[in-house]
Image (cartoon, rainbow, N blue to C red):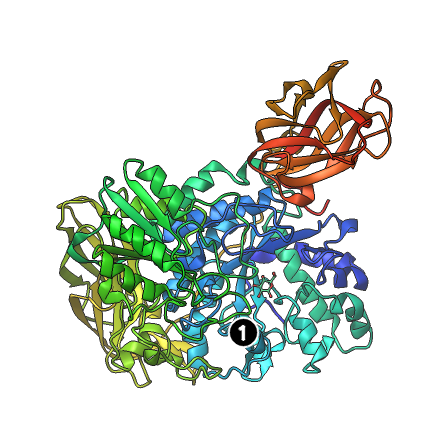
C-alpha cells in the first residue's frame, strides 16, 4: 500500500528505507516488527547499523516495571484542566527528556482518549470529555516529546472507553461513523496531522465487531486513508495474542489488517516468516510495516546518531518546579462562598480527610509512576503557612463505610477556625481494568457524610477533591463554602494546593469534564456509542437540557473578568476564507489572574444531528488588575464542519452559525452571527515535513560513571553505636548484636549497593544494612569473610532490589547469632548510588 501523502521532500527518506529493505533478509525484516527478548525492547538490524530501540509507559512520567522512582508529573486530566497548550508542550519536553535520560527511546503515553463518562476507569489518562480539548492538549504534548527526539506513542486507537477487565478486551462496541470520527477519532487525527506523531497504539476494544488491532477500517481507512498517518502502529499489550487465542483472527489476519509492530507477545517473531513463505502475507506488506519502523528510527535520529539522554534530566529539580507550576495551573476553584478562600495563614486550620497525609498520584495501572517524592497537603500546609496552627485527623477512608475516625475529626474541627477537607478517589476506585468501583459518581465511602457532620461543628468548610474521574457532591455541596478540584495533580500536588488555598496563586483551572449532580443525569455507560455526537459530556447535558452541578469549562478565580466587544471579521462569507472572531476581556478585580477564554460554535441549520454548541477555541490569558486584552480566534473550515458520511470528507454546510465566547460553557455572554454562503469540503491538510536530524557528534552530556558516584565512610566515624565498642587496627569491632549508625546518608535516586570492608573471626557472622535504626528497614546482608580480624576484605552487598533512595540514617548491624565469641572488624563502608540516571536493560 502506498504512503498516503507522498511528497517530493520525502524522496531521500523513502530511498534510504528502500535501500535498507533491499539488503535485508526475510528474517531480518520480521525482526523489525517484533519485540526483542525483553517486552520493552524492539529489534533493529545490527548488520546494517540499525539500532534496537526501547519503550516504556507512561502518560505522566517514566514508569519502570521495577518501580524505580521518577518524577511524577500531573496526570493528563490535570493537563486538560489547565487549558494551557504551552504548559502541555513544556511537560512533553520534560517527559521526553526524562524518558531519554532513563534509556527509553519511546514514550507510551501521549494519551488522547476522550473521557466519555465519570465511570471511565482511565479518566486520569484523558484530557477530558471534549475532543478538541483532548486534541489541543495532546498535540502540544506530542510536539514537546518529539522535539527531544523521544518517540511519542499515542494511545489508544480507538474507543478505549470502558476499562473493566470484562469489557476492555471483550467489549462489543458499536458506533456510527460520525461519532467515531468527530468525537473519539478527532484527537487521533490531530495527533497525526498537527502533532506528526511517530507511533500509535491500538486499543484492546472492538470497533463494530473487530478488535482495533485487526480492524482494517480503523488501521487502513481511518488512520491511513482519511488521516494520512505515515508511521507505525503497535498493539496494546497482549491484544495480538487475545485475537489469536480467541480464534478471531490468525497471525496473517492481524498483520494484513495493517497492524505493524507486535509488542509484548511473540506471534510475529515465531510465525510471520512462515506466513510470508506460505504466501499468506505478501512481502510488500512486510516491507511496508518494517519500512514504517525504519522511517521513525531515521526521523528520531536513532539510526544516524541522536543526542543521548542527559542523566541530569532524570529527576531534575527544574522538573519539580514544572510539576508545581502545572499543578497550580490545573486546580479548579468551583465554589467560594463569602470569599472563604484564600485562607489567612494565621489561626487554626483543621486538616481532615483521607488525602491529607497521602497524596494520590494516579489511579491504578500502567500510567502509575513511583514518585521520587510527593508533597502531601499536610506537609505543604506546614511549609507554606508555618504561622498557622494545624490540626490533623484522617476522619474517614476514601472507600470504606467506617465512621470510627469521625469523633476525632469533629473534635479538632470544633476547635479550628476553618476546616480543610481533602478527599477524593484512589487506585481502589478507578484505573486500568477498573471502571468506578462504587458504580456511582458520588464521592464514595463516608466522605460526604463526614463533610456534613463537620459543617455542624464548624461552618467554615473548604473541600478539595482529588481524582481522575469526576465525583459528584450533591449530598454535601450545600454545606461547603470553598470547593477546589484537583485531577491527580502530580508529585507537587500538595504544594500547589497550599499555594492556591493561601492565595500565592490565583486559580484558573477549568473543568475538563462536566460534574453531574446525580447519577441519574448521566448517559448510559455501555457498549453503544451511536449518536455520541450528542451523547458525551456537555453535548449530552445540553441536548437533554440537564443542568449539571458544574459545567464543562467552569472555574472561578479570586478576581473577576468582564467580556465585551465581540467582532467577527465577516458575518457572511465562504468557509475557504479566513474568519476571525475577537473579543475583549478585562480583569475587573483587584488581583492579577488568568482567564480561560472559550469559543463555542453552534451550527444552526445543519442537516444532520448537532449538539447545541461545541468547543472550537480557547486561550488562557494573564491579566493584571484593570487590564484589558483582545483575544482573537480563527474560525477554521474544520471548526465549522462535520463528517459527511456520503462524501467521506469534512463538510461545511451553507447556512447560519453562531460564535459564542465566554469563560465557561454555561456562561458565554458574547455571541456573533456568521452566515456561510455555500457548501465547502475541507481539504485534507498537507503532511508536515519530515526532517532527519543531523547526526549528533557532540560530547555526551555526562558519562554514566559520573552519575553513579561512590561515597565512602570510615567505620570509626559513626554517629551512634551500641555500647562498649572497641577499635581494632583502624576499624571497629562488632560483637554479635552490636551496631554502628551514620546520620543522614544520601542514597541518591537509587542505591545500587553497599560495599563493606570487613573481616570475621569465625564463619557465619552476618552483617546487615538497615535504614533508620539498628532495627530499621532491612536493605541487604552478607556473611562477613572469615579472613581473621587482621585481614579485611571488601564485600559487595546488593541493595538495589530494596528500592532505597533519598536521605536516611544508615546502620550496620552484626546480627545476633548468640555466639559471644564471634566478632567482625569493619574498616569502612562505601555506597554506589545513582543520581538521576538509571541504566536500563543492562
Ligand atoms: C496496558 C495498557 C497500555 C500500556 C501497556 C503497557 O495494557 O492498556 O496503556 O501502555 O499495557 O504497560
Where is residue 231 drawn, in percent x and y? 59, 62
Give the camera-side residue of 290 and 626: 626
Local packing at callout 1 (Cα closer than 10 Å; few below 14, some 14-19, many 20+) is many
Give the camera-side residue of 769 and 652: 769
Q: Is mark 1 within 8 Å of ligand 1?
A: no
At x 39%, y 65%, the residue is 128
Q: How many marks?
A: 1
Quadrant of the image for the N terminus? bottom right
In the image, residue 98 above or below residue 544: above
Residue 209 visible? The answer is: yes
In the image, residue 557 above or below residue 576: above
Q: Quadrant of residue 632?
A: bottom left
Quadrant of the image for the C terminus? top right
Where is residue 581 drawn, in percent x and y? 21, 62
Please tell me in which quarter of the rendered image ligand 1 is found: bottom right
In the image, residue 769 above or below residue 342: above
Q: Is residue 703 left or right of residue 761?
A: left
Q: Name the secondary structure under disc 1.
A: loop
Residue sitting at the far top: 729
At x 72%, y 17%, the residue is 726
Where is residue 95 drawn, in percent x and y? 51, 48
Q: Is residue 486 left or right of residue 221?
A: left
Give the camera-side residue of 717 and 323: 717
Residue that numbered label 1 is attached to: 164
Where is residue 331 drawn, in percent x and y? 33, 54
Amino acid at each position: 500500500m502506498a504512503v498516503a501523502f507522498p511528497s517530493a521532500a520525502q524522496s531521500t527518506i523513502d530511498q534510504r528505507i528502500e535501500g535498507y529493505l533491499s539488503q535485508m533478509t526475510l528474517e531480518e525484516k520480521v525482526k523489525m516488527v517484533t519485540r526483542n527478548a525483553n517486552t520493552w525492547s524492539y529489534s533493529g538490524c545490527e548488520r546494517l547499523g540499525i539500532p534496537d530501540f526501547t519503550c516504556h509507559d507512561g502518560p505522566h512520567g517514566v514508569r519502570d516495571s521495577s518501580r524505580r522512582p521518577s518524577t511524577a508529573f500531573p496526570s493528563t486530566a490535570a493537563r486538560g484542566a489547565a487549558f494551557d497548550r504551552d504548559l502541555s508542550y513544556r511537560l512533553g519536553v520534560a517527559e521526553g527528556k526524562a524518558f531519554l535520560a532513563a534509556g527509553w527511546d519511546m514514550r507510551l503515553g501521549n494519551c488522547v482518549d476522550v473521557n466519555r463518562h465519570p465511570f471511565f476507569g482511565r479518566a486520569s489518562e484523558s484530557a477530558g470529555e471534549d475532543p478538541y480539548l483532548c486534541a489541543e492538549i495532546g498535540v502540544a504534548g506530542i510536539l514537546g516529546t518529539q522535539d527531544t527526539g523521544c518517540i511519542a506513542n499515542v494511545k489508544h486507537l480507538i474507543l478505549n472507553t470502558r476499562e473493566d477487565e470484562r469489557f476492555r478486551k471483550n467489549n462489543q462496541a458499536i458506533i456510527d461513523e460520525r461519532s467515531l470520527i468527530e468525537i473519539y477519532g478527532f484527537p487521533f487525527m490531530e495527533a497525526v496531522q498537527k502533532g506528526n506523531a511517530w507511533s500509535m497504539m491500538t486499543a484492546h476494544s472492538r470497533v463494530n465487531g473487530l478488535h482495533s488491532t485487526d480492524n482494517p477500517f480503523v488501521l487502513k481507512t481511518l488512520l491511513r486513508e482519511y488521516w494520512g498517518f505515515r508511521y507505525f502502529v503497535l498493539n496494546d499489550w497482549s491484544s495480538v495474542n487475545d485475537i489469536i487465542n480467541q480464534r478471531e483472527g490468525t497471525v496473517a489476519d492481524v498483520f494484513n489488517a495493517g497492524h505493524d509492530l507486535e509488542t509484548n507477545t511473540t506471534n510475529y517473531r515465531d510465525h510471520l516468516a512462515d506466513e510470508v513463505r506460505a504466501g499468506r502475507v505478501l512481502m510488500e506488506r512486510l516491507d511496508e510495516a518494517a519500512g514504517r519502523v525504519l522511517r521513525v528510527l531515521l526521523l528520531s535520529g536513532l539510526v544516524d546518531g541522536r543526542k543521548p539522554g542527559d542523566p541530569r534530566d532524570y529527576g531534575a529539580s527544574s522538573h519539580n518546579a514544572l510539576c508545581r507550576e502545572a499543578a497550580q495551573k490545573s486546580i479548579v476553584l468551583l465554589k467560594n462562598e463569602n470569599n472563604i478562600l484564600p485562607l489567612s495563614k494565621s489561626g487554626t486550620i483543621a486538616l481532615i480527610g483521607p488525602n491529607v497525609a497521602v497524596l494520590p498520584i494516579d489511579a491504578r495501572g500502567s500510567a502509575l509512576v513511583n514518585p521520587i517524592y510527593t508533597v502531601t497537603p499536610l506537609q505543604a500546609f506546614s511549609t507554606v503557612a508555618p504561622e498557622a496552627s494545624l490540626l490533623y485527623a484522617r476522619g474517614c477512608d476514601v472507600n470504606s463505610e467506617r465512621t470510627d475516625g469521625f469523633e476525632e475529626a469533629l473534635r479538632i474541627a470544633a476547635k479550628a477556625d476553618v476546616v480543610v477537607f481533602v478527599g477524593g478517589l484512589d487506585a481502589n476506585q478507578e484505573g486500568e481494568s477498573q471502571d468506578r468501583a462504587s458504580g456511582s459518581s458520588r464521592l464514595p465511602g463516608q466522605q460526604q457524610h463526614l463533610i456534613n457532620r463537620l459543617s455542624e461543628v464548624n461552618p467554615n468548610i473548604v473541600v478539595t477533591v482529588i481524582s481522575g474521574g469526576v465525583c459528584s457532591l450533591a449530598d454535601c455541596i450545600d454545606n461547603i463554602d470553598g470547593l477546589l478540584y484537583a485531577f491527580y495533580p502530580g508529585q507537587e500536588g500538595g504544594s500547589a494546593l497550599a499555594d492556591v488555598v493561601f492565595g500565592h496563586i490565583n486559580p484558573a483551572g477549568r473543568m475538563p469534564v462536566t460534574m453531574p449532580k446525580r447519577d441519574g443525569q448521566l448517559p448510559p455507560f455501555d457498549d453503544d456509542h451511536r449518536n455520541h455526537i450528542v451523547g458525551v459530556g456537555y453535548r449530552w447535558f445540553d441536548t437533554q437540557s440537564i443542568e449539571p452541578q458544574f459545567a464543562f469549562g467552569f472555574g472561578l478565580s479570586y478576581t473577576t473578568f468582564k467580556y465585551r466587544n465581540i467582532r467577527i471579521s465577516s458575518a457572511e462569507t465562504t468557509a475557504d476564507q479566513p474568519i476571525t472572531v475577537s473579543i475583549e476581556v478585562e480583569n475587573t478585580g483587584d488581583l492579577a489572574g488568568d482567564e480561560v477564554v472559550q469559543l463555542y460554535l453552534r451550527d444552526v441549520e445543519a442537516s444532520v444531528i448537532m449538539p447545541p454548541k461545541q468547543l472550537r477555541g480557547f486561550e488562557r490569558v494573564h491579566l493584571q488588575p484593570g487590564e484589558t486584552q483582545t483575544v482573537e480566534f480563527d474560525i477554521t473550515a474544520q471548526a465549522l464542519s462535520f463528517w459527511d458520511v456520503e462524501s467521506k470528507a469534512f463538510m461545511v454546510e451553507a447556512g447560519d452559525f453562531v460564535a459564542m465566547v465566554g469563560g465557561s460553557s454555561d456562561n458565554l455572554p458574547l455571541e456573533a452571527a456568521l452566515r456561510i454562503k455555500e457548501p465547502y469540503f475541507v481539504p485534507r491538510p498537507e503532511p508536515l515535513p519530515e526532517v532527519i536530524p543531523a547526526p549528533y557528534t557532540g560530547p555526551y552530556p555526562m558519562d554514566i560513571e559520573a552519575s553513579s558516584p561512590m561515597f565512602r565512610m570510615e567505620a570509626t566515624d559513626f554517629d551512634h553505636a551500641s555500647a562498649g565498642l572497641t577499635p581494632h587496627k583502624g576499624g571497629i569491632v562488632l560483637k554479635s548484636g552490636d551496631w554502628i549508625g551514620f546520620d543522614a546518608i544520601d542514597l541518591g535516586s537509587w542505591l545500587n549497593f553497599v560495599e563493606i570492608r570487613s573481616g570475621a573471626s569465625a564463619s557465619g557472622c552476618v552483617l546487615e544494612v538497615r535504614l533508620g535504626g539498628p532495627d530499621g528497614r532491612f536493605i541487604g546482608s552478607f556473611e562477613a569473610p572469615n579472613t581473621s580480624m587482621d585481614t579485611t576484605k571488601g564485600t559487595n552487598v546488593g541493595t538495589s532490589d530494596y528500592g532505597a533512595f533519598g536521605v536516611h540514617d544508615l546502620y550496620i548491624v552484626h546480627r545476633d547469632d548468640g555466639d559471644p565469641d564471634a566478632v567482625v572488624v569493619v574498616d569502612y563502608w562505601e555506597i554506589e548510588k545513582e543520581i538521576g540516571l538509571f541504566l536500563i536493560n543492562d
